[in-house]
Image (spheres, helix red, strand yellow):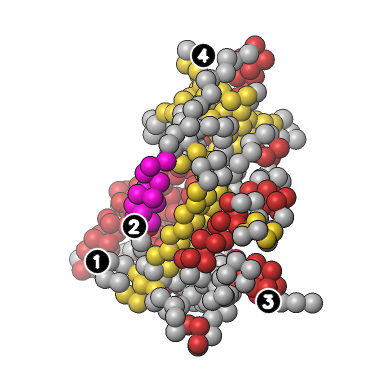
Amino acid sequence: GESFSNFASKQILLPLGMDNATYHPNDSTALHFSKGYAGDANIEVPFPDIPQWPAGTLTAKVDGMANFIRMLLNNGQFEGKQILTESSVKRMETPESSIRAGAGIRYGYSKGIQGTFEKGNLFYGHSGRAGGFLSEFGYSRNLNLGYIILINNVDGGKAIKAIKSALLSSIYRPEIEPEKEISEIDITLQNEILGFYQPITSAPQLGEIAYFIYRLIDMPIIEEKDGHLYQSSILGDKLELLQAGNLLFKNAGEPMASSAFAQDEEGNWLWLTNDASYKQIPTWFGYTQFYMALICILIIAMGFISLIVWIPLRWLRRKRENIQLQLFPFLAISSLVGMIASILLFYNPEKMYSLGAVLFLIFGWLFLILSFLGLVKLLVIVSEKIKVNTWLKYHAFIITIACCISSLYLLYWDIIGLMLWNY
């Protein structure tokens, strides 16, 4: 029977001395706020007002946030008063519902709290980004310290990293337990978990909307050499996985297991990391997806450049017969460029029905329709045996097929037809 903002204020914010903290600023409180900016030129940005306000836009002073972190650092207690129960804080920090948590990983992203390692020490915290503001807080119970950084420029990510690095420059690296010997059971299972893996979730920093890209560029390979397991990539990077238990692994410098192998209900092997979860796939399938995506991108990019030049030249030389053969793929690629531009230039996640969201939806469907209109035009030419310059026909055919494959892929992952009305 009480609003969330009133409850949070009475039970948490006011007892922590965060008298000015609020989710709903009014004219009087807004007078004390910093202005938000963007870019190197510090262009002023309107104060954020996101529709999902409980998930963000808590405005507070740095000293008030310091009290909040002290409370979490002390298991819910602040200046002798228990603000949150110790069990509540523990649940906030502990992943519970994921397969990764069930496999024995004790840290990661849980209920609004993210576990990370800093110089081998476990830190809990979170970051924020809205309007012209960036923020980050973190705390380490074993070091008994915490930090809070607030910046009023949305593009101040490098500054946040530099400040954080300076703040944590004096912390020590704890002693790491020696690597455990691999048992016979582990060696038996080791052969099963080797191979190609593809993400089944997106990285937290990218969001689920970017999964359709992430699944093609982040396909790790688990391989064995001289009794040691390594994570490598198609691009050649390699990182050793140190065993921290049965099917539990950590990276060098980490104090505890950060990834695990487990089987799903169908018996497929999963690799569960702090950034994403992966599913084992046939090696040929992984390489096929990666190189097909790469080839399509290159064809579309080079095709767009060539068509920009070729179509006007044919028009000026009055060679306009069957110009639709190249016009359709050109317009299709232009629509794809329009999708990207509408997100980068016009999309505003803080507004309902922003121009970028509407353009993204329109250009997406145009990309699909124009790609297949180009394919239909090609099929008509072939079926009716219309004479066309051979180079022109194959050039249009290759670009059109790349567009059709790409548009079907975007349609399958709901990128075409996606309504970005806010988030």
Q: Earlier in the sequence, mark 1 or mark 2?
A: 2
Whether residues under marks 1 and 2 lie with C-beta atoms below 8 angstroms apart, the answer is: no
Question: Distance between the Cα atoms at labels 3 and 2?
Answer: 34 Å
The 10 Å Cα crowd at callout 2, few under 14, some 14 to 19, many 20 or more, is few
First to last magenta residue range:
158-171
Q: Pick out the residue farthest to the right.
A: 1
Residue wearing tag 3 = 6
Residue 397: x, y in percent?
40, 50
**Quarter holding residue 68:** bottom right
Q: Earlier in the sequence, mark 2 or mark 4?
A: 2
Which amino acid type is shown beneath numbered disc 3? Asn
Residue 164 lies in the magenta-colored region:
yes
Mark 1 or mark 4, whichever is nearer to me:
4
Which residue occupies 75% across, 35% down?
265
Characterize the magenta stretch by its predominant secondary structure. helix
Question: Distance between the Cα atoms at labels 1 and 2?
Answer: 47 Å
Q: Residue 312 carries which label?
A: 1
Q: Earlier in the sequence, mark 1 or mark 3?
A: 3
Residue 380 lies in the magenta-colored region:
no
Mark 4 or mark 3, whichever is nearer to me:
3
Give the quadrant of the C terminus: bottom right
Residue 374: x, y in percent?
44, 59
Which amino acid type is shown beneath numbered disc 4? Gly
Q: Which mark is residue 159?
A: 2
